[in-house]
Amino acid sequence: MADIIITEFMDDAAVASLKSKWSVIYDPQLHKTPDTLQRELISARGLIIRNQTQITAAMLDIAPNLTTIGRLGVGLDNIDLDACKQRGITVIPAIGANAKAVSEYVISVALILLRKAYFSTNDVLSGLWPRTQLIGAEVSGKTLGLIGFGSISRQVSRDATVLGMKTIAFDPFVDDRDEAWEYTEKDTFNNILRRSDILSLHVPLTEGTRHLIAAEALTLMKPSAIIINTSRGGIIDETALVAALKSDRLFGAALDVFETEPLTAQSGRKFEGLKNLILTPHIAGVTDEANVRTSRLIADKILAALA
């Protein structure tokens, strides 16, 4: 039995720092075997997870000593927060630690989708030389719309501004006096949809945000616009998005998160044949550097909490 359980991958140095103070079970595949995880939790005081580990009230019931859950990321929809609150369990997300990684992902896929040229390797190799067909666009001068304006979204706004983009955002939970509005224009949800050349989503998955971007919202967007989702699957109605891409009502999209995760062959079939689409496996916030920052932050906070 161990004091701290780590169920998904974590930087080795951060794991070592935990092991220097407490007994630790580190198994990056433990999230795949909930029965084994439950047995290990019986004596655990601390738990460290990413997005694949599902923390339910029933699981917490068999962990009477658990006081702290560290989340190697910022999304908390895989944790029963009400159950944690009732049991006095502190949940610690790694706010800000992966903001730069997500921002670079958003900027890079926007560049790739708008420029178009980067999907042409096979055509060039075959001698087709499709030069005129691949004349794309620049991000400079484009309007980047942000739905949600937390730490990650603000980093995206700063980075986009450096590249000459105008940034606008919608977030009803951010005070009008917040200094972040000094460099990003605040607007309504519908106006963000209408004005954006690039739309990037940065909201948690709740009953209020599920299918926030559905058929009606997509019809408000420019046919030349692209949409990027690095927040949570379920924010976008995937069926409606596919229909918009197939009918050229939307220029392109990049999805790092999905309604079904991991994406299966069956659930991914709807995306087949779309050339103006980038799909990645929930990796936007994970770089070598972000993994180190996130892991160190959560390790330090877990050590402080258990002390």
Image (tube, helix red, strand yellow):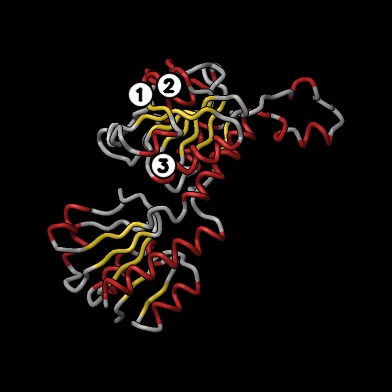
* Residue type for callout 3: Ser
Residues at circles 2 and 3 in contact by the CB criterion of under 8 Å: no
* 153 vs 283: above or below: above
**Which residue is located at x 49 percent, y 74 percent?**
13
**Which residue is located at x 35 percent, y 24 percent?**
189
Tell me the number on the disc at residue 193.
2
The secondary element bearing badge 3 is classed as loop
Q: Which of 118 and 203 is in front in this view?
A: 203
Q: Distance between the residues labelled 1 and 2?
A: 7 Å
Tell me the number on the disc at residue 306.
none
Q: How far apart are marks 3 and 1 (CA)?
A: 17 Å
Q: Is residue 144 left or right of residue 113?
A: left
Residues at circles 1 and 2 in contact by the CB criterion of under 8 Å: yes
**Which residue is located at x 58 percent, y 34 percent?**
110
Sequence order check: which comes first, mark 2 or mark 3? 2
* Residue type for callout 2: Leu
Sequence order check: which comes first, mark 3 or mark 1? 1
* Residue type for callout 1: Phe
> Which is more foreground, mark 2 or mark 3?
2
**Which residue is located at x 27 percent, y 58 percent?**
55
* Residue at the extreme left: 86
Residue 222 screen position, x and y as percent: 51, 16
Residue at label 1? Answer: 189
* 51 vs 263: above or below: below
Tell me the number on the disc at residue 231.
3
Residue 184 screen position, x and y as percent: 44, 32
Residue 117 screen position, x and y as percent: 72, 31
Q: Where's the N terminus, which quadrant?
A: bottom left
- Tag 3: Cα neighbours inside 10 Å, few (<14), some, or many (≥20)? many
- Tag 2: Cα neighbours inside 10 Å, few (<14), some, or many (≥20)? many
Q: Which of 173 and 49 is in front in this view?
A: 173
Q: Which of 249 and 71 is in front in this view?
A: 71
